[in-house]
Image: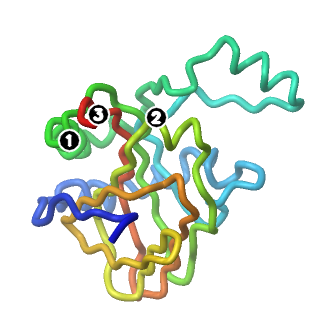
């Protein structure tokens, strides 16, 4: 495989899965990614743990002005990160494992049965800077994760790297919600 690499398996994700079942309210606390115009996450619930300061600009000039004064890679902790302390050891252990030097976006995404993340490629500035990792919390056969011409089934307790610069999508044809903790890390390793 060129676009996916399983880097760990057997990771104990159940404390976080249990916390998510206890905190169903967090799925609807922030709809920024679902509501983002022309975004691929229209059928996805997201819990933002770490994310850039959110901003919506109306014109190209406003976007250019904003980007000239703003580090687009800087992420801050959102309230859900404190509400789900079970996520922190998963994230920090992954940071250590891959030699992380900077922690970026940390988002828990849920694709309900029959739902999808629409085909897209992440922006070059983002994909070239960060390495994208998925910690699989809940998934199973019938969830198709495609990147270019490769397809994988990711199982709970696995951690995967994948090339988010290329077109990718997720289709959930399983009998369960697909839930992943997505973690962006800047690594010191080449």
Per the image, label 2 sits on a secondary structure element best described as helix
User: What residue did someone put label 1 on?
Assistant: 98
Q: Which mark is residue 187?
A: 3
User: What residue did someone put label 2 on?
Assistant: 129
Indicate the quadrant where residue 151 lies: bottom left
Q: Is residue 86 above or below residue 153?
A: above
Whole-angstrom CA distance, mark 3 to mark 2, is 9 Å
Q: Residues within 10 Å of mark 3 (few under 14, many from 20)?
A: some
Q: Residue 86 location, x and y as percent?
A: 21, 45
Mark 3 vs 1: CB contact within 8 A = yes
Of residue 161 and residue 88, the one placed in the foreground of this image is: 161
Mark 1 or mark 2: name the one nearer the start of the chain: 1
Whole-angstrom CA distance, mark 3 to mark 1, is 7 Å
Q: Residue 138 location, x and y as percent?
A: 31, 70
Tell me the colour scheme of the image: rainbow
Q: Is residue 67 left or right of residue 152?
A: right
Q: Which mark is residue 11?
A: none
Q: Is residue 123 above or below residue 51?
A: below
Q: Residues within 10 Å of mark 2 (few under 14, many from 20)?
A: some
Of residue 89 and residue 171, the one placed in the foreground of this image is: 171
- Which residue is depicted at the point 17% across and 41% down? 89
- Which residue is depicted at the point 48% across and 80% down? 172
Mark 3 or mark 2: name the one nearer the start of the chain: 2
Q: Is residue 159 left or right of residue 9?
A: right
- Which residue is depicted at the point 45% across and 49% down? 26
């Amino acid at each position: 495989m060129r676009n996916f690499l399983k880097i760990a398996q057997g990771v104990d994700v159940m404390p976080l899965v249990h916390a998510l079942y206890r905190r169903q309210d967090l799925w609807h606390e922030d709809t920024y990614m679902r509501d983002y115009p022309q975004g691929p996450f229209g059928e996805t619930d997201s819990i933002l743990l770490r994310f850039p300061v959110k901003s919506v600009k109306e014109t190209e000039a406003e976007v250019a002005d904003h980007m000239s004064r703003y580090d687009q890679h800087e992420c801050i902790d959102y309230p859900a990160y404190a509400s789900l302390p079970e996520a922190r050891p998963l994230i920090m252990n992954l940071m250590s494992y891959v030699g992380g030097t900077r922690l970026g976006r940390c988002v828990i995404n849920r694709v309900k049965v029959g739902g999808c993340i629409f085909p897209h490629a992440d922006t070059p500035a983002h994909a070239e800077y960060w390495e994208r990792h998925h910690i699989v919390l809940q998934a199973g056969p019938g969830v198709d994760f495609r990147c270019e011409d490769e397809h994988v089934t990711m199982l709970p307790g696995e951690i995967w790297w994948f090339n988010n610069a290329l077109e990718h999508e997720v289709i959930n044809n399983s009998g369960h919600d697909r839930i992943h903790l997505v973690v962006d890390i800047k690594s010191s390793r080449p």
